[in-house]
């Protein structure tokens, strides 16, 4: 007898692992670095038309441990305790250049906080980074009447890629929250997309963030909107209610998910996706 559909296990194909080398580093602002990667493993990178491409980095918990890519997690689990195993971190790919066989990723620098930021701050040409991917599925719809893009620092690479991929006649708004004016980027966007930078005045806190209110204050245009809204989890929950329930944006036209959660390290944040606290769409259990 066949099993009920809900109980049938579904396994995603494993995304390829690759190890690539740092070939260039660019300071975008006091808190952002753009790092270019290349090497033979570029040929394993299965590029797509999605502009929100992301990869899963694999980084040592302790930079002084001496662990160097490539990592074989199955083998390391046999010899290392759990608190010494490399950890995964999710990062958006800024751009891919098949001619030079390189890809770029942008990193937020938080000083000693986290794993990827400190790694990027200390990175030098020749360093190796291991990651798997890519994932992602958002593409600007040229048939949409207008576009809404909104997010904080974590969403800037994807928003930047989305703006660059839009047709020249696209219209709409991009709202981007950063700490200060120094953190603004020089983004390429169609003339009809109004890019507005929002300044918190310092680090993100639930009290200092301004992106949610800015989205709600935005004059609403007529016609079908395609929205790309990504950032802190609790803000995304609130904006999901506003966009879906109050503004009636169709789920098919809304790319909305949490890139991170205030007060949570990524391992906890990822684990909570399976729990009610981590669900953006509680009625379906979905995180996006």
Image: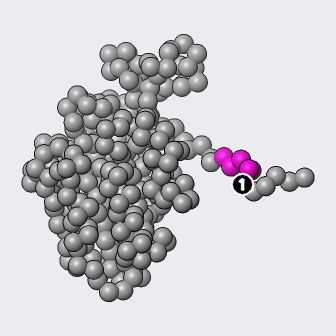
Which residue bears the numbered disc 1?
6
Q: Secondary structure at mark 1?
A: helix
Q: Is residue 80 magenta?
A: no
Quarter of the view holding residue 268: top left
Q: Nearer the viewer, residue 89 or 250?
A: 250
Q: Residue at x 32, y 34 (%)?
A: 116
What type of secondary structure mainly makes up the magenta span?
loop
Q: Is residue 27 left or right of residue 21?
A: left
Q: Which residues are magenta?
A: 6-11
- Residue 199 pos. (x, y %): 13, 56
- Residue 225 pos. (x, y %): 37, 78
Q: Is residue 280 left or right of residue 156?
A: right
Quarter of the view holding residue 284: bottom right
Quarter of the view holding residue 280: bottom left
Residue count near mark 1 (Cα–Cα under 10 Å), binned few <14, some 14–19, many ≥20: few
Residue 159 to residue 140: above or below = above
Q: Nearer the viewer, residue 201 or 122?
A: 201
How many tags in the picture? 1
Residue 246 to residue 87: above or below = below
Q: Is residue 284 left or right of residue 148?
A: right
Residue 149 visible within the image: yes
- Residue 237 pos. (x, y %): 38, 57
Residue 195 to residue 10: above or below = below
Q: Residue at x 36, y 35 (%)?
A: 265
Q: Residue at x 42, y 49 (%)?
A: 54
* Visual colour scheme: one colour
Q: Residue at x 14, y 52 (%)?
A: 200
Q: Nearer the viewer, residue 70 or 90?
A: 90
């Amino acid at each position: 007898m066949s099993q009920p559909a809900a109980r049938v296990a579904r396994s995603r194909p494993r995304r390829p692992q690759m190890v690539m080398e740092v070939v260039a580093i660019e300071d975008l602002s006091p808190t952002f670095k753009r790092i270019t990667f290349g090497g033979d493993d570029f040929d394993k990178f299965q590029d797509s038309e999605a502009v929100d491409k992301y990869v899963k980095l694999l980084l040592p918990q302790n930079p002084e441990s001496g662990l160097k890519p490539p990592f074989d997690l199955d083998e390391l689990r046999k010899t290392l305790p759990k608190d010494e195993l490399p950890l995964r971190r999710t990062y958006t790919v800024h751009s891919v250049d098949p001619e030079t066989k390189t890809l770029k990723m942008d990193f937020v620098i938080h000083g000693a906080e986290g794993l990827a930021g400190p790694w990027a701050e200390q990175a030098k040409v020749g360093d190796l980074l291991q990651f798997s991917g890519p994932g992602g599925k958002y593409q600007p719809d040229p048939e949409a009447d207008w576009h809404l893009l909104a997010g904080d620092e974590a969403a800037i690479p994807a928003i930047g890629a989305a703006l660059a991929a839009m047709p020249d006649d696209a219209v709409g708004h991009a709202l981007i929250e950063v700490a200060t004016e120094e953190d603004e980027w020089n983004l390429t966007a169609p003339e009809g997309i109004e890019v507005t930078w929002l300044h918190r005045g310092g680090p993100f806190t639930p009290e200092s963030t301004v992106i949610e209110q800015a989205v709600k204050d935005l004059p609403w245009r007529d016609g079908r909107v395609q929205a790309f809204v990504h950032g802190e989890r609790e803000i995304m929950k609130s904006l999901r209610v506003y966009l879906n329930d109050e503004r009636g944006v169709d789920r098919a036209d809304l790319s909305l998910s949490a890139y991170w959660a205030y007060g949570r390290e990524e391992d906890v944040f990822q684990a909570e996706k399976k729990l009610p606290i981590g669900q953006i769409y509680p009625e379906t259990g979905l995180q996006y």
